[in-house]
Image (cartoon, grey):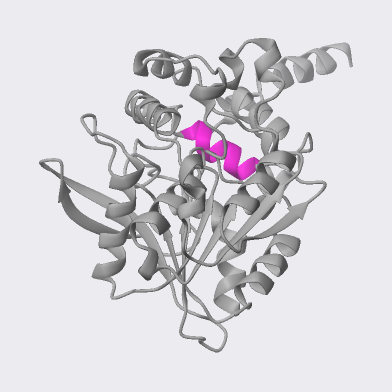
Amino acid sequence: MRNMLLALALATASLPTLAQQQPVYGARLEGFDYPYPVKLFKFQAQRQPLEMAYMDIAPTGPANGRTAVLLHGKNFCAATWEPNIGALSRAGYRVIAVDQVGFCKSSKPRHYQFSLSGLADNTHALLESLGIDHPVVIGHSMGGMLAIRYALMFPRDVSHLALVDPIGLEDWKAVGVPYQSVDQWYAGTLKTDYESTKKYQMDVYYAGTWTPAYERWARMQAGMYAGDGKDINAWDQALTYDMVYNQPVVYELSDIKVLTTLFIGLKDRTAVGKGKAPPEIRATLGNYPVLGKRAAGAIPGATLVEFADLGHSPQVADPARFNAALLKALGQP
């Protein structure tokens, strides 16, 4: 019996831990399946051929003639919108969920000047190629920052702007977050693994909670850093950190001319570069109960929807409640 128990203990000890079971995905997220077929928009920019991956989902309910365009956050992909895509499709929307250049299944250029204006222009070109005009534009986190830039650049092409815990509602540089070079961002991003990803997501996205439903998205992000794509993903992420830090949109909120709804998780405390800020400044950053109200007051005619118990990702943490609030807002004239 003693020998059997010893053998069992040795066998158990040799099993890989959960962290060691991390799947490895390709540089462009090869191996991770999206919930709907992925298409590629091929175009030229900055003297190089590029591809934007996207999903184009037809209405599953009676078509309402409207299109919803979904813009992901910095540590997210088009696939992360899965529970929201289904709700919009059932409500009659055609849904376009995009991976921006430098992210997920889209091109990962090593030499590319990232700008919010450039990403907005890429997205506009994609929609033009699909014959889509006047869509609902829904952006989360960095995608909310991008959606703001899109609405400022193409105000006549947006029917409704929905911002889900957008970053950029404060100017981190102006309030005292120290500058980091691209090389510093790169060095930090190279350390990305499953454990660090889960801890950050649990603390920031899900207000200290964790459920099995969140696991897939943590594994998705960590998987891009577990294989040969680690270097290029870290490099492009470093370039986009530099982009969001240096290209604030907060000063232009009053210039938004389209119908806007803000969806804010009141437990959100996201701020780019927060960890490098002095403690007295760090404590003031990412105060979304204040930032959400301030932004809603700055954007003409904006509506504010708050989720008292949710963090940075209300659309993932409680999709049923978020989807109901989103569809209600989009139904407003």
Q: Quadrant of residue 112?
A: top left
Could you tell me if residue 18 is visible in this image? no
Q: Position of residue 245 (x, y in %)?
A: 44, 28
Specify whether residue 161 is painted magenta. Answer: no
Q: Position of residue 66 (x, y in %)?
A: 47, 79
Q: Using residue 322 as the reference point, say whether residue 228 is left or right of it.
A: left
Instruction: Please identify the dominant SS of the magenta region.
Output: helix
Residue drawn at the location 71% of the way across and 17% of the way down: 13
Instruction: Count the labels in the image.
Output: 0
Q: Residue furthest right?
A: 1
Residue drawn at the location 28% of the way across and 53% of the way down: 121
Given residues 227 and 251, the one toward you in this image is 251
Given residues 187 and 105, the one toward you in this image is 187
Q: Which contiguous range is marked in magenta?
A: 215-223
Residue drawn at the location 34% of the way across and 23% of the way down: 231
Q: Residue furthest bottom?
A: 62
Q: Quadrant of residue 166?
A: top right
Could you tell me if residue 291 is visible in this image? yes
Instruction: For the N terminus, give its image quadrant.
Output: top right
